[in-house]
Image: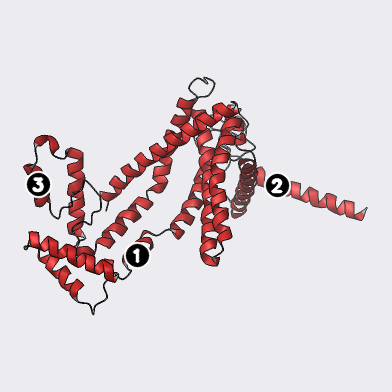
Amino acid sequence: MYSNEKESRLVFFVLIFKQNLSVSHKALRKEDNCLNCGTTVPDRYCPHCGQENTEPHESFWHMVQHFLYDITHFDSKFFDSMKFLLLKPGFLPAEYIRGKRASYLNPIKKYVFTSAVFFIAFFSLFKAGENLKMNVDQPIKKEDRVAYITKLKAALANDTTKSELEAALLLLEDSSRVLTNQDMMPYWDDFNYINIGNRSYQTKREYDSVQQALEPGKRDGWFRRKLQYRNLELKQQYKMDPRSGMNKMMETFLHKLPVLLFVSLPLFALLLKLLYIRRKNFYFADHGIFSIYHYIFSFFLFLMVFGMDELSDQTGWELFDWLALIFFLSGGVYLFMAMRRFYGQRFFKTLIKFILLNIGAILALIFLFFAFLIFSVYSI
């Protein structure tokens, strides 16, 4: 009996605490005009904008109450939504377009939160400078050194005016000195920030001279010419330290990935709209909601993939590599199941649309990657 009374009191106090968190006990204002929109307020809440007509000066305790309520309210909705997101593909977007929204965290808020967590983890794991360092700081092998010497002698035989080639040849012929690719990068003619065509140039003057010698129909167009000019500007700017320029370009590109994915979201929704164009009961916004939830799941999935990959690097266990592969492949299965539940079509029809959706999404991402890479080149 005592135990039951004790439990009853505990439940009572919990309910009272939650009541205090969710209901404001601040004093009402004597004036009946809403401070937010100016509408006359007949009771506690404005009938136009919903703002509570209470005194604007909050006590410290009221701030603590609101903070605790917002945290607990967010946590409960977030984890409830995550449970359905992971275990029932396509359920949450279907609930949303049916109007059942109060029980789950708003998809826009969830997208912002999960994308923030994802990119914090992503940028802590992937650094452009470290990745490039692995490629250029290795010593040049003996056979590569011989091949470079042969290549430089052939280039000097055709053009003896290039002093930088003579300097590179002297370095390579000094067998007592250990050289890396980083040491030789300033001397290579074929290093480019953007690969355009089969020929490499060192200056705009050289490029323009070659272009003028070509027939009008074989010359580069306006776009290729602009890219080549920018490439040559970067080669001159970072001539003695090409890796520094490449690092800046890659870092700029990586930090534009959040924008790239956000831009790709409506394109993904557009692909769905085209695939289900005969389903008149689905509006573009409905496809957008489906896309948002799919991106949220993808953020969570790639966090798991990166986590398994990191554990593999730290432990050396191949098991984590296999788990990373399984998690990655499960994303396709999840999308297929989500499409079936959300759009309610048969297996084979959904499978065909699933394949077309992936092809279209890959092409769209390739286009966006190229566009953002060009933008990054002009941003450094």
Horizontally, residue 7 falls left or right of residue 22, namely right
Identity, as a three-letter code, of the amino acid under mark 2: Lys
* First of labels 1, 3 by sequence position: 1
Q: Is residue 334 above or below residue 180?
A: above
Q: Which residue is mark 3?
A: 210
Q: Which residue is mark 2?
A: 18
- Residue 332 x %, y %: 54, 41
Q: Is residue 288 visible?
A: yes
Identity, as a three-letter code, of the amino acid under mark 3: Val
Q: Nearer the viewer, residue 217 or 376?
A: 217
Q: Are marks 1 and 2 in contact (CB under 8 Å)?
A: no
Say which of marks 1 and 2 sits in front.
1
Horizontally, residue 44 falls left or right of residue 310, namely right
Q: Secondary structure at mark 3?
A: helix
Q: Secondary structure at mark 2?
A: helix
The Cα–Cα distance between marks 1 and 2, rounded to whole angstroms, is 55 Å
Q: Are marks 1 and 3 in contact (CB under 8 Å)?
A: no
Q: Residue 165 sits in which quadrant? A: bottom left
Instruction: Identify which residue is drawn at 9% across, 62% down.
Output: 157
Q: Secondary structure at mark 1?
A: helix
Mark 1: give few (<14), some (14-19) or many (20+) Cα within 10 Å: few
- Residue 349 x %, y %: 55, 26
- Residue 284 x %, y %: 48, 27
Q: Nearer the viewer, residue 362 or 116?
A: 362
